[in-house]
Amino acid sequence: MTEIVDVYWSFRSPYSYLVTPDLIRLRNDYDVDVSVRVVYPIAVRDPSLVFDPSNRNKAIYIGRDSRRRADFLGMPFFAPNPDPIVQDFATMTVAEEQPHIHRLSALGIEASRRGRGLEFVVEVAATIFGGTKGWDQGDHLKDATARAGLDLDELDAAIDGGDQLDEVERNQQALDAAGHWGVPTMVVRDEPFFGQDRIDTLRWRLDQLGLTRG
């Protein structure tokens, strides 16, 4: 029987972007269904975990390390323009009005419901972090969605008045129940593996479970 690997993932997390090629390889190499479960970024869920104006070390380190990790992996990496989260980095204040993250998160949920969640986050994350300026303008998202095998107009129509953001909240509760708070967190048989650099450990566990494809 195919094993489910739940992946808690956000559209602002650089590490969520960096894990996407590994998730594709995971699905190809093992008898698993990689189920993308979109959550809001830490900046929305609990900004105090990272964005403490009295101590910027966490935020600075994440920016530095994610660029280094992208270099290590040979992946393009640029600061998103625009940032999926509207935030004043002088004060670390997260704006109440967020024009991007709610739509992105709802689209990710709807893509998952249509069986193309992994493909969607792969393409959209590459657009956001891969150097596309104004990724929210023109046909950038439409083209990324098409590469994922979906139609953006259809997704937008489905999320208009839909319950996708309720599922985001449920995913956040499930992430907490799994014993973690960060993204990406991969969970198999109730065991969490946090971070892009834990894929090898997850693969080791899948090997132990006998899930390698023949």
Image (cartoon, grey):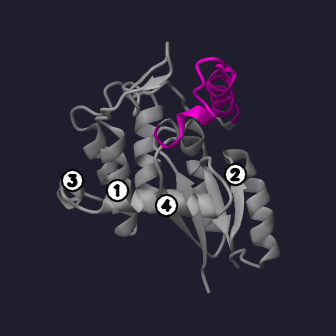
> Which element type, helix, strand or loop, lies under badge 2?
strand
Residue depth check, mark 2 versus mark 4: number of the one nearer the observer: 4
Residue depth check, mark 1 versus mark 3: number of the one nearer the observer: 1
- Could you tell me the amino acid type at mark 4? Asn
Q: Give the Cα distance between marks 1 and 2.
A: 23 Å
Q: Earlier in the sequence, mark 1 or mark 2?
A: 1
Q: Which residues are magenta?
A: 44-72
Residue at the farthest top position: 90
Please tell me whether residue 60 belongs to the stretch shown in magenta.
Answer: yes
Closest to the observer, 97 or 152: 97
Q: Earlier in the sequence, mark 4 or mark 1?
A: 1
Residue drawn at x 79%, y 67% is: 205
Instruction: Tell me the chief SS of the magenta region.
Output: helix
Instruction: Find residue 171 and name its label.
Output: 4
Residue drawn at x 77%, y 77% is: 209
Residue 83 in the image, given as x and y percentages of width and height: 41, 28
Q: Is 203 situated left or right of 126 in this image?
A: right
> Which element type, helix, strand or loop, lies under badge 3?
helix
Please tell me whether residue 14 is drawn above or below residue 177 in the rendered image.
Answer: above
Please tell me whether residue 54 belongs to the stretch shown in magenta.
Answer: yes
> Which element type, helix, strand or loop, lies under badge 1?
helix
Whether label 1 touches label 3, CB < 8 Å: no
Badge 1: residue crowd in 10 Å (few <14, some 14–19, many ≥20):
many
Q: Earlier in the sequence, mark 2 or mark 4?
A: 4
Badge 2: residue crowd in 10 Å (few <14, some 14–19, many ≥20):
many
Closest to the observer, 31 or 157: 157
Q: Give the Cα distance between marks 2 and 3.
A: 31 Å
